[in-house]
Image (spheres, helix red, strand yellow):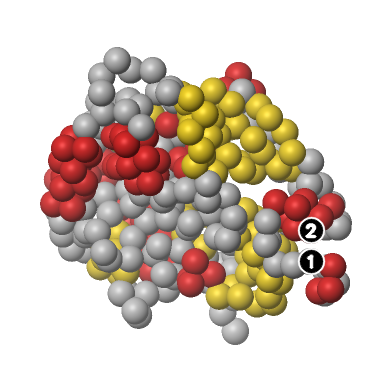
């Protein structure tokens, strides 16, 4: 046991199946799986972890593919914490990393903060949106960020600003071994946000994406001046299937899974899509989904 169970208040589990915590519903086990009770519990736990023990930070698992061999070391799940959204003033809020982006949109619309409706088009939590600069409808997450709070692997908390990060389209690079706890977001548009506009965005998602089915959201980034879904559809790949994983017939940039799927089915399908689009269109598609963990050993 890495940490005595009588010194932490959260849950520490050995060999926990990670498919329970990802939106694709596939993946192997975490060697150790920790759910902190609060920030103090998390700080204490991190302060006791040896420097050579790998740590993987798991949010809501909406943009993640865990390989069938699982993840060695410790997986930290924030599912019980970082859920607050606080109004600071008429233009600014502080949002915990585990708050769903749809909640960010709903609350900020209620507080007349715009532009905020676009968060309705982002699946998952704010933490994931920060990690990949997620966006929708022409807006991106980091356009709204004034500061973020992070925690490092020894339990120290930092306050950082956007200048501490290299922020690009669907990619954010910052200090190593730090994870987002919260962010302060500023909404300074003179346009009053609209519940009707949010409903339109949600309806567009419902009509164009396979919501309600296991998926990881958009699999590939849109290449410059093009759309990944368009390239995949024009490659006649809609409905193509490997094992229990299938390219959605509703939206070609989504992969959905059934109860028979394993992670390797999804990864093989991703590789097949990339190879086919490269062959037909000479375009290298870049993954938006994060692929982590080990391949399962065949005995």
Asked if residue 6 is positioned above or below residue 201 in the image, the reply reads: below
Alpha-carbon span between mark 2 and mark 1 = 7 Å
Label 2: element kind? helix
Q: Circle 1 sits on which residue?
A: 8
Q: Position of residue 116 (x, y in %)?
A: 33, 31
Q: Is residue 51 left or right of residue 111?
A: right
Asked if residue 123 is positioned above or below residue 4 in the image, the reply reads: above
Q: Is any atom of residue 143 visible in this view?
A: no
Please identify the quadrant where the N terminus is shown.
bottom right
Of label 2 and label 1, which has the lower sequence position?
1
Q: Circle 2 sits on which residue?
A: 45
Asked if residue 24 is positioned above or below residue 39 in the image, the reply reads: below
Q: Position of residue 143 (x, y in %)?
A: 43, 23
Looking at the picture, tell me which residue is in the foreground, 217 or 5: 5
Looking at the picture, tell me which residue is in the foreground, 298 or 11: 11
Instruction: Classify 10 Å Cα crowding around label 1: few (below 14), some (14-19), many (20 and above).
Output: some
Instruction: Classify 10 Å Cα crowding around label 2: few (below 14), some (14-19), many (20 and above).
Output: many
Q: Residue at x 49, y 66 (%)?
A: 21
Q: Is residue 253 left or right of residue 103?
A: left
Label 1: element kind? loop
Q: Is any atom of residue 242 visible in this view?
A: yes
Instruction: Say which of marks 2 and 1 sits in front.
Output: 1
Do the residues under discs 2 and 1 have CB atoms within 8 angstroms? yes
Looking at the picture, tell me which residue is in the foreground, 203 or 266: 203
Q: Is residue 152 left or right of residue 224?
A: right
Q: Residue at x 81, y 74 (%)?
A: 5
Quadrant position of residue 160? top right
Q: Position of residue 41 (x, y in %)?
A: 75, 58
Looking at the picture, tell me which residue is in the foreground, 278 or 206: 206
């Amino acid at each position: 046991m890495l940490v005595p169970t009588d010194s932490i208040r959260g849950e520490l589990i050995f060999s926990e199946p990670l498919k329970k915590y990802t939106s694709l519903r596939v993946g192997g086990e975490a060697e150790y799986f920790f759910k902190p009770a609060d920030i103090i519990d998390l700080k204490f736990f991190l302060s006791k972890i040896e420097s050579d023990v790998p740590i993987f930070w798991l949010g809501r698992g909406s943009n993640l593919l865990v390989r069938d061999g699982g993840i060695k070391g410790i997986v930290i799940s924030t599912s019980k914490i970082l859920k607050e959204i606080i109004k600071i003033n008429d233009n600014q809020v502080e949002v915990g990393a585990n708050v769903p982006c749809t909640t960010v949109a709903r609350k900020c619309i209620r507080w007349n903060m715009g532009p905020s409706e676009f968060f309705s088009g982002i699946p998952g939590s704010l933490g994931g949106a920060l990690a990949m600069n997620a966006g929708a409808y022409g807006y991106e997450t980091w356009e709204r960020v004034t500061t973020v709070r992070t925690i490092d692997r020894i339990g120290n908390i930092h306050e950082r600003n956007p200048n501490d990060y290299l922020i690009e389209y669907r990619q954010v690079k910052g200090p190593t071994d730090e994870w987002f706890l919260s962010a302060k977001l500023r909404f300074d548009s003179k346009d009053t946000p609209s519940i009707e506009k949010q409903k339109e965005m949600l309806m567009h998602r419902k009509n164009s994406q396979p919501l309600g089915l296991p998926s990881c959201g958009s699999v590939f980034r849109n290449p410059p001046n093009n759309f990944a879904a368009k390239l995949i559809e024009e490659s006649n790949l809609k409905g193509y299937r490997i094992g229990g994983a299938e390219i959605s017939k509703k939206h070609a940039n989504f992969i959905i899974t059934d109860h028979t799927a394993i992670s390797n089915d999804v990864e093989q399908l991703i590789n097949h899509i990339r190879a086919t689009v490269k062959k037909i269109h000479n375009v290298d598609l870049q993954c938006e989904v994060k692929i982590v963990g080990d391949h399962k050993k065949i005995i």
